[in-house]
Image (cartoon, rainbow, N blue to C red):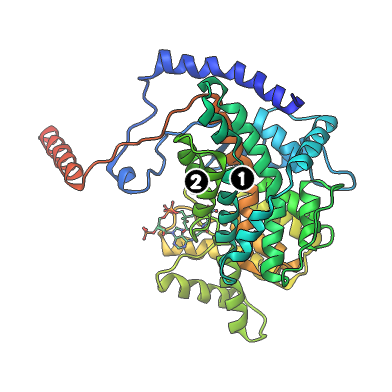
């Protein structure tokens, strides 16, 4: 058994009694009440999911296994000659909560290389799709096509003890994750580089190999490492993470579950926002017709968007109430590598103006930028200008957190998810009763 798998096994043994004890002794303890507003309003703030992989504080932002983004980057072993850590080391960390040594990280690097070969039929599936298919539809199709490979589905069909469910789920998670850079880069080259595919380089790590297969020179390898880690996880309630968890809760395997999550990520209010940001910004620049943008012109463009009943992409968040630290992390990268790049300057100017506009507009609870407001500019700078591809990059990253989560879901035996729904009439009755009680109490 690999060091990672053995460490994970030990962690699972330690964790299981905690979950069992909570269920046995404290099942009836309340975590909060659910309001009608939350029931109609997308379950916002309802505490009904559990994960130890990451936690999103509204004011602080994300922590992976207790570490902030800078602490995570600082702690993990770095790829030689690079400022950024191995994605493989991050996988070890996010799965087990332990920072791996360089040797443990390199063991995962080698393990992923053994798992990275993509079956030929995946390329056939991708080539059979209409040429104008969205890259996210291609990505999701490639993943679900590989369901054929599921170790979990085979083991389950043969009869698998519930206590052992995590083991083949872990195998599927590693097999799937190791293939995603090759699939992502293949989609890019097939769609946007005339099918001129670049073969993987077995000497490179996850991020380095992705950059190589994309055909983009360094430091795009560092961009990729940073990008995949930043987008990996944002606790369990966001659409992609929740979807993966929900689908896997039916004991669907990792291929079905991740493909479903990718479909959710493809929505413009979620992962597609990075594409929308670039679309919005480029349309704005085009309208300027070569004139220098000013804050006043940007303000007017933002109001145009709001007044036409659309959202400002890249701004707002369901949980965060400050600038997303993932935005800041990418901004720091831009300040270091591309401070004078005109597109970065426009994005920075929007950052100066948009929060005030959104505050004045008075709807968004969070007027600050999220991760998607900054990410496209870096891709554009390195020549990846086809913004319909950007959410695939997000998807490769998001796979890391969600696959780790469903491995733990199986380890802790979380049940099939089944919240309860009510009818509108039931809500009206409950509301009327509450109003009558309040009126009686006021007398
Ligand atoms: N522009 C204009 N209006 C906005 C807004 C924005 N950026 N953000 C929120 N609002 C509006 C909402 O549409 C909502 O309007 P209605 O009352 O008419 O429905 C109101 O403000 C209250 O919304 P909220 O409570 O502040 O935000 P939600 O939790 O409902 O939605 C979203 C969170 C991220 C979906 C929202 O802020 C949004 O649409 N932002 C723009 C799209 C975007 O950047 N998405 C990516 C988010 C990060 C992410 O998941 N990445 O994958």
Q: Residue furthest bottom?
A: 289
Say the numbered circle drawn on residue 197.
none
The quadrant of the picture showing ligand 1 is bottom left
Q: Position of residue 37 (x, y in %)?
A: 30, 45
Q: Residue furthest front?
A: 158
Point out the tag, 2 or 1, that comes first from the N-terminus: 2
In the image, is residue 179 above or below residue 92? Answer: below
Q: Tell me the CA gap for discs 2 and 1.
A: 13 Å
Side (left or right) of 360 relative to 402: left
How many badges with numbers are in the image?
A: 2
Which residue shows up at 89% across the image and 44% down it?
A: 80
Q: Position of residue 155 (x, y in %)?
A: 57, 30
Q: Residue furthest right?
A: 81
Dot 2 falls on a residue whose secondary structure is loop
Which residue shows up at 83% across the image and 41% down it?
A: 78
Q: Position of residue 201 (x, y in %)?
A: 84, 52
Ligand 1 closer than 8 Å to label 2 CB: yes
Side (left or right) of 225 relative to 103: left
Q: Between residues 324 and 222, which one lies in front from this camera angle?
A: 222
Dot 1 alpha-carbon crowd within 10 angstroms: few under 14, some 14 to 19, many 20 or more: many
Q: Find residue 109 and report its image quarter.
A: top right
Give the residue number, with chain letter if any, for mark 2. 238
Dot 2 alpha-carbon crowd within 10 angstroms: few under 14, some 14 to 19, many 20 or more: some
The answer to the question of whether label 2 and label 1 lie on touching residues, with beta carbons closer than 8 A, is: no
Which residue shows up at 57% across the image and 74% down it?
A: 298
Residue 62 in sight from this viewpoint: no
Give the residue number, with chain letter if any, for mark 1. 399
Q: Quadrant of the N terminus?
A: top right
Which residue shows up at 54% across the image and 65% down it?
A: 354
Image depth: mark 2 or mark 1 in front: 1
Q: Find residue 287 and report its image quarter.
A: bottom right
């Amino acid at each position: 058994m690999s060091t990672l798998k053995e460490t994970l096994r030990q962690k699972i043994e330690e964790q299981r009694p905690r979950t069992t004890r909570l269920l046995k002794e404290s099942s009836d303890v309340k975590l909060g009440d659910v309001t009608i507003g939350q029931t109609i309003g997308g379950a916002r703030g309802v505490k009904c999911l559990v994960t130890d992989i990451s936690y999103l504080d509204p004011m602080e932002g994300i922590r992976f296994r207790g570490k902030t983004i800078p602490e995570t980057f600082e702690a993990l072993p770095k790829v030689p000659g690079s400022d950024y850590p191995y994605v493989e080391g991050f996988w070890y960390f996010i799965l087990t909560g332990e920072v791996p040594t360089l040797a443990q990280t390199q063991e995962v690097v080698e393990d992923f290389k053994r798992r990275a070969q993509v079956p030929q039929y995946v390329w056939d599936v991708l080539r059979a799709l209409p040429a104008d298919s969205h890259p996210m539809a291609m990505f999701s199709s490639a993943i679900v096509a590989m369901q054929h490979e599921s170790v979990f589905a085979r083991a389950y069909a043969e009869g698998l003890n519930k206590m052992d469910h995590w083991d083949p789920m872990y195998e599927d998670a590693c097999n799937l994750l190791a293939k995603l850079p090759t699939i992502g880069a293949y989609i890019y080259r097939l769609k946007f580089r005339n099918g001129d595919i670049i073969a993987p380089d077995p000497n490179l790590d996850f991020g380095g190999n992705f950059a190589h297969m994309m055909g983009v020179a360094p430091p795009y390898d560092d961009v990729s490492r940073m990008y995949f880690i930043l987008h990996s996880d944002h606790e369990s309630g966001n659409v992609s993470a929740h979807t993966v968890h929900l689908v896997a809760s039916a004991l669907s395997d990792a291929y079905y579950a991740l493909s479903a999550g990718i479909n959710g990520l493809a929505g413009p209010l979620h992962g597609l926002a990075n594409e929308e940001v670039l679309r919005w910004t480029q349309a704005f620049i085009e309208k300027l017709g070569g004139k220098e943008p000013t804050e006043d012109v940007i303000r007017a463009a933002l109001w145009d968007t709001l007044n036409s009943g659309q959202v400002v992409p890249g701004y707002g968040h369901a949980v965060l109430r400050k600038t997303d630290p993932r935005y800041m992390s990418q901004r720091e990268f831009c300040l270091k590598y591309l401070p004078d790049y005109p597109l970065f300057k426009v994005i920075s100017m929007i950052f100066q103006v948009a929060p005030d506009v959104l505050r004045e507009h008075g709807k968004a609870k969070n007027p600050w930028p999220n991760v998607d407001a900054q990410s496209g500019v870096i891709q554009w700078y390195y020549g990846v200008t086809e913004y319909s591809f950007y959410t695939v990059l997000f998807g490769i990253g998001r796979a890391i957190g969600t696959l780790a989560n469903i491995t733990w879901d199986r380890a802790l035996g979380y049940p099939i998810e089944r919240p309860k729904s009510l009818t509108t009439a039931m809500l009206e009755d409950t509301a009327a009763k509450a109003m009558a009680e309040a009126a009686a109490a006021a007398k």
